[in-house]
Image (cartoon, rainbow, N blue to C red):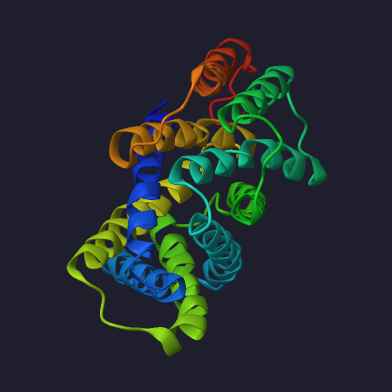
Amino acid sequence: MIYVLFLLMVTAVWGWTFVLVKDALTHYPTLPFLQLRFILAFLVMAVLVRRLPTRREVRVGVIAGAVLAAGYLTQTVGLTMTSPGNSGLITGLFVVFTPLIDRIFGVALRWYTLVAVAAALGGTVLLVGGPSGFDLGDILTVACAFLYALHIVLLSRWSPGLRSAPLAMLQMGTGAVIFSAGGSWSLQAPSADVWLAIAITGVFASALAFYIQTWAQQHLSASRTALILTTEPAWAVVAAVVLAGQRFGLLQALGAGLMLAAIVGHELAHLKFKPHGDKVTA
């Protein structure tokens, strides 16, 4: 249960940063923003790493980091074209993609996971106001959701037995290298507000958040992780309403409630129906 609580804290941070990043990107280019964010995240994790990574940790960290960087790129570019609320909500589609990708790798799905996935998908559709009206920013965010799902599956398959801090550091470092390759040409001095966004997203939403996610996924399955992380869109809605002044109708409120019900229902079902001795899988 401790892993679930920590992941829920992470989703609250991620949900709030949609508004923060949206505001920063109105004053600063996307790639340099990501470059500075991931460099800072890498430096924070480097302080926490006590020993050099093993070869396996390097391999896993670089591959997972490249997938994560691609997800952040599509999400952040998409965020420049859509609202923080829509971006956060559409990102929640990773809950649909994760079990599908997991199934390709031969992982069986339990009936209550399928029910929760269906409920979370239905809630996501309600939250975005229906399947129509997707623009380029929304499409890029759908691509982001798929990449985030792939990242979740890779960590669940490869991270058990490896140290969390080196894996998180390598993922942040890989992102820093990728974004530096594309963003250095337009790098410029950020304003104080942009620096604040870089500091918050780099330290809390990147370094510490993915450290916690990597640690938690050594004990949770990919599908269960994805379902827990679907609270991120609900937090994004709250932040969009409170901080950005977005307004959502009854349909969106029903969608948020349905997604939260899927999370709680899945956790209760996991506790009731898990096989004897199964403490960490879903």
Q: Is residue 46 visible?
A: yes
Q: For this rendering, which residue is in front, 149 or 244? A: 244
**Image vertical order of residue 63 relative to residue 268, above or below:** below
The picture quadrant where one finds residue 66 is bottom right
Position of residue 273 measured from the top left corner of the image (x, y, whole percent): 63, 12
Q: Position of residue 85 (x, y in %)?
A: 46, 40
Q: Position of residue 155 (x, y in %)?
A: 58, 52
Does 138 appear above or below 254?
A: below
Instruction: Name the residue furthest bottom.
Output: 185
Residue 253 image point, x, y percent? 49, 20
Q: Is residue 143 above or below residue 54?
A: above
Q: Is residue 274 left or right of residue 214?
A: right
User: In the image as oriented, which residue stretches furthest toward the top?
Assistant: 272
Which residue is situated farthest in the left direction here?
192
Q: Is residue 281 left or right of residue 51?
A: right
Q: Nearer the viewer, residue 171 or 234?
A: 234
**210 relative to 45 in the view: left or right:** right
Determine if residue 6 is in view: no
Who's the residue at 52% across and 77% down the image?
A: 178
- Displayed quadrant of residue 29: bottom left
Task: Work out which quarter of the rendered image holds the C terminus and state it.
Answer: top right
**Which residue corresponds to the image point at 81% horizontal and 45% vertical from the top-left?**
104
